[in-house]
Image: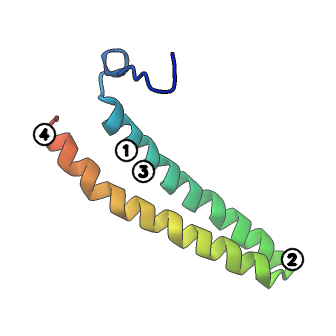
Amino acid sequence: MTDTEFVETGAITGTKDKNYNLTWFLQSCLENALRLQTYIADAEASGDTQLVELFTKAQANSQKGAELAKPLLASRLVREE
């Protein structure tokens, strides 16, 4: 397959690729936010305020991504495009 070819895998997964990708993105954002909580705690325990700040900002971005994806996914689950 070349870079310009596209194969829809929805027949295999039962979900159109664009909706599967959205579902994956939401799950990844939520998992990342949870994982970063551990990293924040580790950084706090070691007194590394730079890492606390970095991981806290990254966690907020992951939470924001999840919040943006949830209503979009919900609307697509109601009606399959």
Q: Amino acid at mark 4?
A: Arg
Q: Is residue 5 left or right of residue 33?
A: left
Residue lying at the far left in this picture: please name it: 79
Q: Secondary structure at mark 3?
A: helix
Looking at the image, residue 2 sits to the left or right of residue 5; the answer is right
Residue that carries the numbered disc 4 in the rendered image: 79
- Dot 3 alpha-carbon crowd within 10 angstroms: few under 14, some 14 to 19, many 20 or more: many
How far separated are the C-alphas under marks 2 and 3?
31 Å
Name the quadrant of the C terminus. top left
Dots 4 and 1: beta carbons under 8 Å? no
User: Which sits earlier in the primary sequence, circle 4 or circle 3?
Assistant: 3
Secondary structure, mark 2, is helix
Q: Which residue is mark 2?
A: 46
The x, y position of residue 31, in whole percent, is: 55, 52
Residue at 40% across, 23% down: 6
Question: Mark 2 to mark 4: distance in Å?
Answer: 48 Å
Mark found first going from the N terminus, 2 or 3: 3
